[in-house]
Image: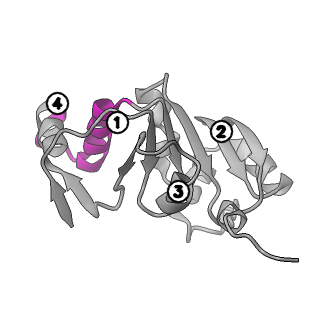
Amino acid sequence: TKFTFNKPEKKNFLIYDQIGSDLIRKYLPDSNYNIFSARLEKINLYCLFLSFIKYNFFSFKLMRNYTLTYIDLTRPNLIISLIDNDSFLWNVKNFFPKIKVVLIQNGIRAFRKENYKDKHFGEIIRKKNDKYIVDYIFVFNKYFEKKYKLFFDCKTKIIGSFRNNAFNYKK
């Protein structure tokens, strides 16, 4: 884990998670984005300290508080992520209703009660009556579009695999 000490800069875009950020960066204006390390590869100590003050040092929701503080400090207009199965992102609109949230489907999802290997989608099944709010979800195909719409209040766009679409191939 690396540590930074400076207050994070305000940028228009926030890429949530290092994983896949190299693919997303290709589509964003140069240096107008921050990358949030959701797996704590990089910890901003200024933000961490502020989250202790703002949300109570003894809170058991340290990661959530740290993430909320980071978003508040960077004030992005849009959060984008390839981590579509991170339940924190499903709830960002509850804290920051004006920030646009875009999720990109990153893998095959099984929307069955029997499949609890994908912990977060197991949570969706259990909370089926609640709809999470995100602005857009880019999905693989019509099947997944229909499934995501059962659990999310969002606009969808079928794009296939974002990761596979990043590669050029010759016919």
- Amino acid residing under circle 4: Lys
Instruction: Tell me which numbered mark, 2 or 1, is placed earlier along the sequence.
Output: 1
Horizontal and vertical percent for residue 113? 66, 62
The residue identified by callout 3 is: 83
Which residue occupies 78% across, 74% down? 169
Instruction: Tell me which numbered mark, 3 or 2, is placed earlier along the sequence.
Output: 3
Secondary structure under badge 3?
loop
Instruction: Tell me which numbered mark, 1 or 4, is placed earlier along the sequence.
Output: 4
Instruction: Tell me which numbered mark, 4 or 3, is placed earlier along the sequence.
Output: 4
The residue identified by callout 4 is: 54
| Quadrant holding the C terminus | bottom right
Residue 110 in the figure: left or right of residue 11 = right
The residue identified by callout 1 is: 71
The residue identified by callout 2 is: 136
Residues under labels 4 and 2: Cα distance?
Answer: 30 Å
Q: Nearer the viewer, residue 95 or 113?
A: 95
Residue 63 in the figure: left or right of residue 135 = left
Residues under labels 3 and 2: Cα distance?
Answer: 13 Å
- Amino acid residing under circle 3: Ile
* Mark nearer the viewer, 1 or 4: 1
* Mark nearer the viewer, 4 or 2: 2
Crowding at label 4, few (<14), some or many (≥20) Cα neighbours within 10 Å?
few
